Amino acid sequence: MRENKQPKLYIVIPCYNEEKVLPITAPMFKKKIEDLIGAGKISGDSRVLFVNDGSKDATWEIIQSLAKADRCYSGVSLSRNRGHQNALLAGLMEAKEQCDITISIDCDGQDDINAMDAMVDEYLDGAEIVYGVRSKRQTDTFFKRFTAESFYKVMKWMGADTVFNHADYRLVSARALKEFANFKEVNIFLRGMFPLVGFKSTCVYYERAERIAGESHYPLSKMLALAFDGITSLSVKPIRIITGLGVGISVVAFLLIVYALIAYFTGNVVSGWASSLIATCFLGGIQLIALGVIGEYVGKIYMETKARPRFIIGERTDEEK
Ligand code: UDP
Ligand code: MG
């Protein structure tokens, strides 16, 4: 148990083109904060922090007017769209200086905000990171459920171990975030990186609902891109699999050479044409895949050595006051 001080909570919410949902969900987040304050679990100056990820619609204007009307809301706006992970990181880095705990959540109302009570309880019990885990996926279509669950399985098999069925709904203490700030990489996959920070952590289970309004920004193509980024930023297992394949194929190639030699000495030279053609094509294909995967890692190294800023904040609602 922690000493008897109520932590200051920031709910951090990345928003990209969410003008349809924001007016509905913003009051829900505020109410949750008020309930938690009422229950004596968090301090009275807890707030909601929106991160506008370069939206093209009225999202930032909505955030600004929310912040103007109510001190409970605040917002930062990125200079352009950088994607969900970078937007969330920007919000967490902003919040860590101002609060004791953060809870990150999407703004579409899919994640059950009532799980926040249990998250805060776990923090009060000593956990520094609390992962929100989906207990069921009943509201998803079969296709979404199948692709999403395969995502976690393939990730795990490829050496990028993440908490199963945990997305980016989690409580992280400012203490853990300050350590996390030392992870300087630009290819970020937050749900795979937070377990690397360590400290006491635990899970809270909840059911995920359907989006209240608007559309998902994670179609299959983006999910595949996220999985690929997750694997290559957390693990070198694909390279090792390729090395293994290379060894296996070399053994087969060696046997083929022995076969070719025997054929040569027994005078059957022309009959080897088909098998050598197959072997050449096969090796050519495998080599291209291998080069591609290695190229992917070289590309990542290239991006990392440039060490460009991961996000740039263009505006803050707090500065206007
Ligand atoms: N998001 C963002 N930048 C982007 C895409 C999405 O900040 O480029 C935010 C979005 O506003 C939402 C969250 O990330 O709050 C998750 O996106 P979405 O709900 O579309 O994904 P899904 O829940 O369908 O996986
Ligand atoms: Mg969503």
Image (spheres, rainbow, N blue to C red):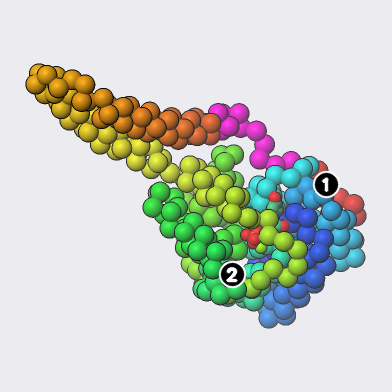
Residue farthest bottom in this picture = 39
Q: Position of residue 272 (x, y in %)?
A: 22, 25
Q: CA distance from mark 2 to mark 1?
A: 36 Å
Horizontally, is 159 left or right of 179 in the view? left
Above/below status of 273 relative to 202: above
Question: Badge 1 is on which residue?
Answer: 315
Q: Amino acid at mark 2?
A: Asp
**What residue lies at 36% left-to-right and 29% top-to-bottom?**
281
Q: Amino acid at mark 1?
A: Glu
Q: Quadrant of the C terminus?
A: bottom right
User: In this orientation, which residue lies closer to the viewer: 164 or 101?
Assistant: 164
Mark 2 and mark 1 residues within 8 Å of each other at the beta carbon: no
Question: Badge 2 is on which residue?
Answer: 140
User: In this orientation, which residue lies closer to the viewer: 261 or 302?
Assistant: 261
**What residue lies at 34% left-to-right and 41% top-to-bottom?**
241
Q: Position of residue 121 (x, y in %)?
A: 57, 74
User: In this orientation, which residue lies closer to the viewer: 130 or 250?
Assistant: 250
Q: Position of residue 228 (x, y in %)?
A: 51, 45
Q: Position of residue 56 (x, y in %)?
A: 82, 49
In primary-sequence order, the first of circles 2 and 1 is: 2
Per the rendered image, the range of residues in magenta is 302-312
Above/below status of 230 relative to 297: below
